[in-house]
Amino acid sequence: MSNYDKFYQLHHQQAPFILANVWNVKSAQLLEKAGYEAIGTSSGAISSSLGYEDGEMIPFTELLYIVQRIKLSTNIPLSVDIERGYGDDLNVLRDNIQKLLDLGVSGINIEDSQGEDIYLKKLECIKNYLLRTNQQLFINARIDAFLQKLQSPVEITIKRAGLYREAGADGLFVPAAPDTDTIKEITWSTPLPVNIVGTPNFPVQTLANSGVRRISMAVLLYRSTYEHLGDIAGQIAASTATFPLS
């Protein structure tokens, strides 16, 4: 079974699966060793780790390098957060998708922060390209109605879910949904698997009971890792203030 097939099936099993978000080879290897069945990059974590602001500030070539190193160093399915696709030119977008496919990526996450009209063109472009070239890639469509604080975000999310499904999306990612009632309304409105970020307010069992099929971590692991590193570094610096290391 290919990694794409494994990744697709994870979204359609009875219980939700946890997608661990990574930013470099070591984080990916540790999560694979811990038993996670799939990993996904976090655009925010990768950008921050390389000194860039999030929001496609990192050159696509640098993102590709990180993705390549992760893919070569792990064996489980890998999904890549490509933000808005790193190009509004559809030819550039198709080229970016092919470069990811060439690396063996199983899925992508692409956001609709530019609005549904531009997004639908991008989504249809990707899907038509995959069909024409007989290639497979799980497309997770991120709906930003709550993140952008649009009016009537539930109605917009449900509407876009239908449009994106028709255009070829395989799953939906809804960040910043405020509560479980809202999440249930969204999951019950669509046959597509819905992805929500797990948090202390949204533990795994709560999201499972709300119909969620994919639970991701966004930048949570990245932030926790470097907060811990900062604490340790601070403790060492404080303990050596009287007796310098050099």
Image (tube, helix red, strand yellow):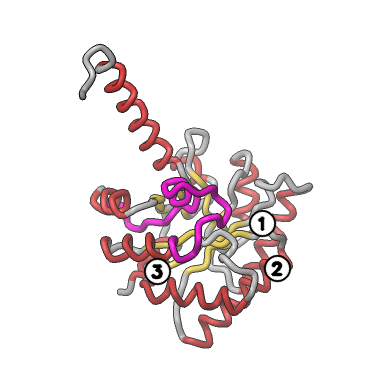
Q: Residue visible at 78% across and 47% down?
A: 151
User: Local crowd at mark 2 within 10 Å, few (<14), some, or many (≥20)?
Assistant: few
* Image coords of residue 124 (percent x, y): 63, 76
Q: Quadrant of residue 181?
A: top right
Residue 161 at x, y = what percent? 65, 62
Q: Secondary structure at mark 1?
A: loop
Quarter of the picture containing the N terminus is bottom left
**Residue hosting label 2:** 118
Secondary structure beneath dot 2 equals helix
Distance CA(mark 1)–CA(mark 3): 23 Å
Please check the rendered image and state whether residue 61 is part of the magenta-colored stretch, yes or no: yes
Residue with the mark numbered 3: 105
Residue 216 in percent (x, y) is at: 46, 49
**Which residues are the magenta region?**
35-63
Labelled pair 1, 2 in contact (Cβ < 8 Å): no
User: Which of disc 2 and disc 3 is earlier in sequence?
Assistant: 3
Amino acid type for the residue under numbered disc 1: Ser
Give, as a three-letter code, the residue at label 2.
Ile
Q: Residue at x 36, y 37 (%)?
A: 225
Q: Quadrant of residue 224?
A: top left
Q: In the figure, residue 117 lies in which quadrant?
A: bottom right
Quadrant showing the C terminus: top left
